[in-house]
Image (cartoon, rainbow, N blue to C red):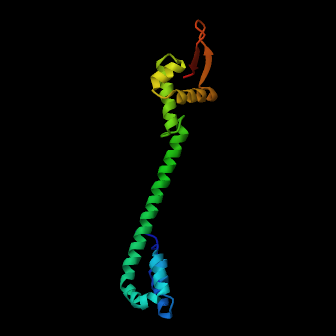
Amino acid sequence: MSSQSPYVNKTLSYILWGLGCFGVCGLHRFYLGRPITGLIWFFTFGLCFIGQIIDVFLINRMIHNRNKFLEEKEQVEKILIASDTKESLLQRLLPFPVGNKKNQQMQKLLKAASDNANVLSLGQAILITGLPADQVQELLTDTLRKGIARIDNEPESGAVRYYFDI
């Protein structure tokens, strides 16, 4: 547990339990993160006060379990925040976000262009990347839009070629 005060106050838990003596049973269970049994205790007067008496012996364990749960939850949140921060830093440093399938396909296309003197036809791109024609066409359109490639005709044959600036 952290060096700060506990997440769940033991004194307050016992005070809420003590309210059961005045007919308001189950509030301590709500406080300790057990809302379903809290409702049962509330509407049945602590299971005819028997459950309320049993809880006086169980309340220390419930407090311990709740504090442990809250501590683990806080640790997980810290880890998630740290990993999110690292991922956002990585996203800013890389030209294409990591893990995105479309970006992996884009990198595959750029690698193919790099291996072919920065020039590809639609057929070559389909053959080299192994992707379906419509996906390759969409990727090539994206490269044109982003200024990564330009489209032109080959002087001798007039065939359409994509010239990559990589």
**Viewer-nearest residue: 10 or 18:** 18
**Viewer-nearest residue: 20 or 42:** 42
- Determine whether 59 is above or below 134 in the image: below
Q: Residue at x 45, y 22 (%)?
A: 128
Quadrant occupied by the C terminus:
top right
Instruction: Please indicate, yes or no, whether residue 105 appears anywhere in the rendered image.
Output: yes
- Determine whether 30 is above or below 98 in the image: below
Quadrant occupied by the N terminus:
bottom left
> In the rendering, at what x and y percent does residue 96 appear?
53, 35
Residue furthest to the top in view is 156
Instruction: Please indicate, yes or no, whether residue 2 appears anywhere in the rendered image.
Output: no
> In the rendering, at what x and y percent does residue 70 appear?
45, 68
> In the rendering, at what x and y percent does residue 137 appear?
56, 27
Q: Which residue is drawn at 49% across and 89% down?
A: 19
- Determine whether 148 is above or below 83 in the image: above
**Viewer-nearest residue: 48 or 93:** 48
Residue furthest to the bottom in view is 22
Q: Residue at x 39, y 85 (%)?
A: 55
Q: Residue at x 50, y 50 (%)?
A: 84
Count of numbered circles on the image: 0
- Determine whether 164 is above or below 5 in the image: above
> In the rendering, at what x and y percent does residue 161 appear?
57, 16
